[in-house]
Image: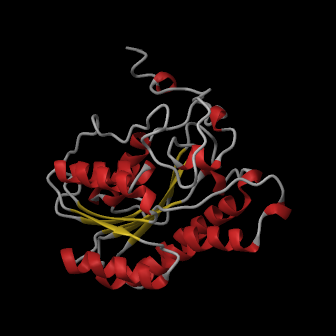
Amino acid sequence: MKTEENNPIDKYAKPPFEKQDQPVPGVTKIMKPMPDHGEESYEGKGMLTGKVVLLTGGDSGIGKAVAIAMAREGADIVVAYKEEVEDEDALDTKNWVEKAGRSCILIRGDIRSEKHCEAIVQTCVTKFNKIDVLINNAAYQMTYKTVEEISASEWNKTFETNMSAMFYLVKAAKEHMKPGSCIINTTSVNAYDPNPTLLPYAASKGAIQNFTASLAQLFLEDGSGIRVNAVAPGPVWTPLIPSTIPDHEKFGANTPIGRPGQPVEIAPVYVFLASDAASYVSGATIPVTGGRVTI
């Protein structure tokens, strides 16, 4: 039966949205509409029972939804995030994880530092003695009208946050990951269909796509048995959008579905890739783009 509830086009709010500029990186509580992270809707099925998940960018947006979903699937969660202004969002994530009966550790700091990435890994291992799932999700983006206005420091900040941090975390975590564990990297529809106003961000997401494919082959060929995959979200309604996209009132209108995705709609893909159901999946990127083509 076709109902409005089942129709993905009508499932969540569509643009135009209210103009709501925020300072970077943005916070959830003043967004209109509020993002859905699955707080009231996601139901776990025990797909990750006993696993330990290390997740960057887990305070809000897609990362928050993934943390909630994986906790309800039976995993303990270590959440890394950057800014003091994000403390409230991070504490809310921790609260939802603990309501699911799982443990949650919050670690604030800049993942552009290799030493901080090493400290994140060590904190996780000290507490839980292992890492089953590493999710490289944190990202930085800004909008630019011309290439001339992109400074070298902004270019480097984007690649250091989005790409170098993944390398640091993978390198530090690998020795603590047993066969059957996995790494999931967040790329973007911009890896396939780059938005020219997001030049550094889009370029970094293309690099992540290549990094994922190369790492997947390396980790299977070296016998470590660690699967590596990526998720490529399309436009998703998170605090990063009103804080970095000037025309966010129209955000997501260019998808065939006609609206941005909600974080809860992205999280199940990460759950699948982290689960034993994906044992034959490595080197793949799964698009979650609201119908935008990625081929």
Residue in the image at 36% along x and 52% along y: 88
Eyeballing the image, is 185 above or below 88?
A: below
Eyeballing the image, is 7 above or below 229?
A: above
Picture quadrant where residue 67 is located: bottom left
Query: Percent position (x, y) of residue 162?
Result: 56, 67
Residue in the image at 56% along x and 76% along y: 164
Say if residue 255 shows up in the picture.
no
Query: Percent position (x, y) of residue 242?
Result: 58, 43
Q: Along the horizontal axis of the image, is 215 left or right of 148?
A: left
Q: Along the horizontal axis of the image, is 31 left or right of 279?
A: right
Picture quadrant where residue 144 is located: bottom right
Query: Percent position (x, y) of residue 283?
Result: 49, 66
Q: Nearer the viewer, residue 277 or 66?
A: 66
Query: Percent position (x, y) of residue 263?
Result: 43, 43
Residue in the image at 39% along x and 55% along y: 59
Identify the residue at the far left of this view. 101
Q: Nearer the viewer, residue 274 or 27?
A: 27
Residue in the image at 58% along x and 61% along y: 140
Eyeballing the image, is 168 above or below 87?
A: below
Total labels drawn: 0
Q: How is the image coloured?
A: secondary structure
Say if residue 84 shows up in the picture.
yes
Picture quadrant where residue 149 is located: bottom right
Where's the N terminus, which quadrant? top left
